[in-house]
Image (spheres, coloured by chain):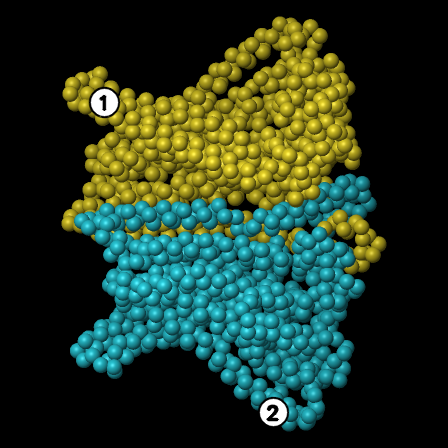
Chain colours: A cyan, B yellow
Amino acid sequence: MQLGLSFSDSDVSSFTPLVVLELADDTKAEAITWLLNRIRDKQQNGGAELLVNQLLFPAQDDQKSNPNVFVVGSTLQRLLNGAEDVGLFKEFQDGTMRGFTYANRESFKDFNGDGEGFLSDAECQYIIKHGLDTLRAKNEQHVPGYPKLKLYPGKSVVRRLQSKGVLIQYFPLHNKEDLKRLSFSWYKKFKLSFQPLDDIRHYFGEGLALYFGFLEYFTFALVPMALIGIPYYLFDWEDYDKYVLFAVFNLVWSTVFLEVWKRCSATLAYGWGTLSRKKAFEEPRAGFHGALGFNPVTGREEPVYPSSKRQLRIYLVSVPFVLLCLYLSFYVMMVYFDMEFWAINTYHENPNIATSILLFVPSIIYAVVIEIMNLLYRCAAEFLTDWENHRLESSFQNHLVLKVLVFNFVNCFASLFYIAFVMQNMVLLRQSLATLLITSQILNQVMEAFLPYWLQRRRNKKVHKRMRRLMGDKELPLLGQVQLETEMNTYLGTFDDYLEQFLLFGYVSLFSCVYPLAAVLVVLNNITEVYSDAFKMCHVFKRPFSEPAANIGVWQLAFETMSIIAVVTNCALIGLSPQVKAYFPESDTQLILIVVAIEHVLLAFKFILAFVIPDVPKHIQVKLAKLDFDSLEALKKRVSTHLHIKKTNKKYFFVNF
Amino acid sequence: MQLGLSFSDSDVSSFTPLVVLELADDTKAEAITWLLNRIRDKQQNGGAELLVNQLLFPAQDDQKSNPNVFVVGSTLQRLLNGAEDVGLFKEFQDGTMRGFTYANRESFKDFNGDGEGFLSDAECQYIIKHGLDTLRAKNEQHVPGYPKLKLYPGKSVVRRLQSKGVLIQYFPLHNKEDLKRLSFSWYKKFKLSFQPLDDIRHYFGEGLALYFGFLEYFTFALVPMALIGIPYYLFDWEDYDKYVLFAVFNLVWSTVFLEVWKRCSATLAYGWGTLSRKKAFEEPRAGFHGALGFNPVTGREEPVYPSSKRQLRIYLVSVPFVLLCLYLSFYVMMVYFDMEFWAINTYHENPNIATSILLFVPSIIYAVVIEIMNLLYRCAAEFLTDWENHRLESSFQNHLVLKVLVFNFVNCFASLFYIAFVMQNMVLLRQSLATLLITSQILNQVMEAFLPYWLQRRRNKKVHKRMRRLMGDKELPLLGQVQLETEMNTYLGTFDDYLEQFLLFGYVSLFSCVYPLAAVLVVLNNITEVYSDAFKMCHVFKRPFSEPAANIGVWQLAFETMSIIAVVTNCALIGLSPQVKAYFPESDTQLILIVVAIEHVLLAFKFILAFVIPDVPKHIQVKLAKLDFDSLEALKKRVSTHLHIKKTNKKYFFVNF
């Protein structure tokens, strides 16, 4: 099947392919023709005005590869207009970041000549994605050739095709040159240095760059704690009551850590132009369904799903399910403690090497079981959140994050809380913490990077072999690359990476005073994490679309909640320490009252600190204010211009505001 | 002295006087000529384009009245343009609130004919105030005739004249007709009804209307508590341990109260067009001084004061001073307790009517002393905050509010906390609370309304007498009105009114479980407060300039902090109740742990509740989203228009963005 212009390596020069679009291999020809025409059509006519061509495999292909693979590119002019359309912020001549406009293009700092190289690949791909996503149905009743694929005016064509499986996927292509440079400066040179965050942002977008920025910041922030932790660990191993100082340090650290991060994140986001960028109007997510109605905001026809129904699903199904899972998690925990006691008894009855190894077995089993439960629950949570039928991707994500976070928190920390505050057994706490930390780290690294890498290598070899069989020794870089990347796994976003950091933060901020080595372990983990994450982004997964982000979003809240819990936990641990108890030999009451009082003061202090430290550094605030001021002044000038020309130009000005 | 056009009652028809401008009576003629010319000058030439005339007194005046009184008005055209300039939001044809633009004037709901009556008096006066405030020096080196009154380009002329005492005051005139109507519907008809908030806003602006809205809302919210409180008071007077239920009720009430208010406030502010209105760029306050430098935001020349110096003043002088005052307040409290014990001892030694009256004397003295200390401290705080030399009025206000709040809180509540938690004497707590509440209420009403009213009446009589002596029986409404209002007291903003409500909220939410009648007393107080406040706004004070406000600002935070303290206090009171203590006969420890646990759960619940309840009601959210969406769409349309005309019109578009 061959539609429109064919496209293979021979005419690669016609445009730079940036995005790959894969349709199901049994897609009807008329649907393809229609889609390609709509993509190529002028924007005035409601098209996306993009360049698109089919990727043709040589005739001798053994028919196993999907013929309906298309590459999408764009003219420079369309990209620059698109940059204005999506509201990209770029550096202005005066060093501030301003919304790019085509009319003022010459006033932007890196704009030379016709603007070649002004936009990064990631930005171009984002603009193309935006163009495809906002390609809307006009008067078509359904997708040509598919009477069941209903359309209505304004419906995003790509979302509809995606939700019905006609569009299998669309993803941005890697740029081999840039990738090579990036991976060299990122993880291939073996010297201690900061990550090339700007380059990462350039290649993968702001969302991912912020994750790596946070990972780096978190790791550096842990270094002082690790440095203090090592002597503590070495010289006070059996002297449990020296941890008061460490707990106090924890308290201050966890508060300051997050406040300073907000400022760093604001600085990064400002430099990347996402801090003051306005959020675009959000489309309903692909999976959202409902009776056709009218959106009260846009006035467009679109599916409407009563929020009362959603609330019912949430409160009558999801919440009970989550509670049930939490109960299950508690049950498993109690089983673990039974096993633990049995192991200890066995050891005491017959102490030898076998039984002393047995001592660690319950913890290891428990750590593995926790990981499995987290994984299973994750699938269930995704299914449930999907079933709740959220209209927006962001609301879907928030509900998913909340569900997963609560369960993961309980699952990972319940046993530690139980040991610390019910059993009050600090030796066991220390031992469990160490086992949990080490086991889950090893599991994570294997599951996250090495397993996918191994699978990917097997797949690569197969593709290379087939390619060689097909073409002999002819060089077919584009064809081969597309073939390879189509089969790569899709990176599902930073969720799992942040979740892992969240749990590590929990281990460190909650309990590191009883196990000072925790910080050291987390630092070691994060150093390998940087490399394995960098590696998996560059070589294991498809390149993800760049995601504009001004901060780490809901995770900031999650980390802050954890740091509040840390204050309470650390105060309680201080209260339990023999050292402190020694000061109040007679009455527990007084001790508890004092600990509670201190805890309240610390919490109050924490809130005041969060309130007093500005979230955005002063020099960025000044720049933002300057931007606001300039736009106000421009508005004023425009208003006074109006007064003189308004009579002649009324209709135009109506659009203007 | 007579400058420019003269203006007396005979030619009142030339324009409606809206604002009065009073210069010092020894102002030099050239300064006056210059100022009037600048005010009258076209906006293109940097003037304010307003109408201004001197108010001339009849020749037979005995020279006692200041001749330099001017009235300012404006043409309708200037006002409508000004409405666009200050960013006024008005109701659009489709029922949403949109930023008013002169070009689209016909599309706004209440715009008829030439727009007469479209803007309220308060809005017109606000626009005139904005015009006067933003009248900037051009190339003048100093005010003509005053070589010491230095000017630099961009300096607000009015602020400079005001800071040096040349401009004594400027204030909006009352509108007798509207005032009569308003005061009738507000407080003169004796039937139970809601306040006419829209009319109040129409006449006094959003800031004040929000205060009265809050006052009303608070009062209504207290009614259920008062209704529960009366039977509690009547039947359980000596049964102290029944207050657990009441404390729980308090907890829930104080949280829900503030969350619901946010939604009410958002609804009000949306209807008044202040919710989505952008804050204008703030001028330095009149009292701000410093070496001349450049503002990093505007690039204009203006005084610059290093923030490090300000920080030093705050931390080395203000903070120690506040701490000293707090110590003093504690000291006074301890003296009060000594007096209290002495009085009780005297009564027990010789119980008769005289000594039983003596029992109440210390509390009354203490209440009076507290009021006096609050007053003195207020003056000191204002002086200090002024001395800290804040650049912006808002930052000045925040520092002042913080200083005053902390002191007032300690001053009013320290003794109650001491009695409740150190002495654990609930009978005394109840008695002190009653005395404090009643005394401070009586004092407040007298100081706030009746004393100023009495002074004002004396002044009125004097003015009337003089006027009659001057003119005989001739009617001179404008002259008389200006004369009268010039001498009225200036309303200093809603600070004191909110502060009073804040303290009342504290009494109720913290301790009403031990003295259920508190809510009843506060309700009674607030009902009279509505009347006395309404009366003082209409008849005691000068009309204040309308202050656009979207919410109650820093007070929301203050009330929320109080409600958090209320959770802690109520939990502690529950823990102290004999009823609860009876459940844990053996161990205090367990009781305390359980109370602390419950407190933490309640605090967590409170934060979750605050997070889950949206601050803006759904239907307002939809309207706001619609507005955002429409402006995005308009922007898109404009962008596509650009692409066709950008070549010819480049310079214009540069201004456009």
Kind of residue at disc 1: Ala
Would you say residue A345 is visible in this rendering?
Answer: yes
B383 is higher (above) or lower (below) than A38: above
Q: Which mark is residue B343?
A: 1
Q: Is residue B625 left or right of residue B43?
A: left
Relative image position of residue A373 (x, y in whole percent)? 37, 73
Q: Which mark is residue A440?
A: none
The residue depicted at 51 percent of the width and 32 percent of the height is B385
The residue depicted at 74 percent of the width and 21 percent of the height is B145
Would you say residue B78 is visible in this rendering?
Answer: no
10 Å neighbourhood of mark 2: few (<14), some, or many (≥20)?
A: few
10 Å neighbourhood of mark 1: few (<14), some, or many (≥20)?
A: many
B16 is higher (above) or lower (below) than B65: below
Residue B236 vs residue A510, the one in the foreground: A510
Residue B411 vs residue A318, the one in the foreground: B411
Q: Is residue B574 left or right of residue A450?
A: left
Quadrant in which residue A113 is drawn:
bottom right
Relative image position of residue A15 (x, y in whole percent)? 75, 75
Q: Chain of mark 2?
A: A
What is the CA distance from the residue labelled 2 to the residue labelled 1? 102 Å
Q: Which mark is residue A465?
A: 2
The residue depicted at 65 percent of the width and 68 percent of the height is A122
B649 is higher (above) or lower (below) than A468: above
The residue depicted at 73 percent of the width and 13 percent of the height is B1
Q: Is residue A309 left or right of residue A642?
A: left
Kind of residue at disc 2: Lys
Relative image position of residue A336 (x, y in whole percent)? 28, 72
SS category of the residue bearing label 1: helix
